[in-house]
Amino acid sequence: MRKFSHVLLFILLPVFVMAQHTVSGTVTDAATGDALPGANVVVVGTNMGAAATADGSFSISNVPAGSYTIIASVIGYADDSRSVNVSGDATVNFSLETSALELSYWKFWHLAQVKEHLLPIPILQKQK
């Protein structure tokens, strides 16, 4: 019986040492406080991440203990990153600032040139 308990201890020890945790929080607009549904939240250097729900909340499960950088991003807003030390369940809240999308002069000029060189397409009609 004593050997059995030692074997069981060695089998279960890695489970307790390598405990998995949850990183959760919210992603909101910094100016209005409104939720940003669909925002991407990623644990840098891993394949773990989540998308914010309709109320701006997210939850990333099975995060091993350690130090990580968490990044939140959504189109039209500047990305925000936070450092978090995961030793238990952690909460990280993001408030993203709006960011204007930039289109360089060259890209605009190139698009304008392409538009000028479009060929007209004749419309064929069936004669009666």
Image: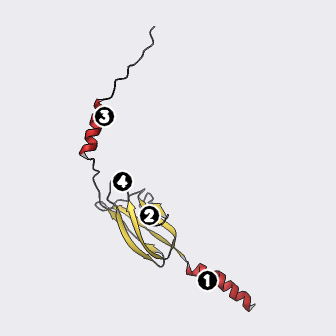
Q: Earlier in the sequence, mark 1 or mark 2?
A: 1
Q: Is residue 58 left or right of residue 119?
A: right
Earlier in the chain: of badge 1 and badge 4, it is 1
- For the point 43% across and 62% down, the residue is 41
Q: Amino acid at mark 1?
A: Leu
Residue 111 percent coordinates (x, y): 29, 38
Separation of marks 1 and 4 at Cα, in angstroms: 44 Å
At x 34%, y 61%, the residue is 79
Marks 4 and 1: in contact by CB < 8 Å? no
Asked if the residue under mark 3 is in contact with the one under mark 1, i.e. CB atoms within 8 Å, the reply is no
Which is closer to the viewer, label 3 or label 4?
Answer: 3
| Residue annotated with mark 2 | 42
Q: What residue is disc 4 on?
A: 75
- Circle 1 sits on which residue? 13
* Amino acid on which the number 2 mark rests in the picture: Val
Q: Secondary structure at mark 2?
A: strand
- Residues 80 and 119: in front is 119
Of the residues shown, which amino acid type is indicated by label 4? Ile
Q: Position of residue 26 (x, y in %)?
A: 40, 65
Mark 2 nearby-residue class (10 Å; few <14, some 14–19, many ≥20): some
Crowd tier of the residue under label 4, counting other residues whose Cα lies within 10 Å: few below 14, some 14–19, many 20 or above: few
- Quick check: 69 above or below 17? above
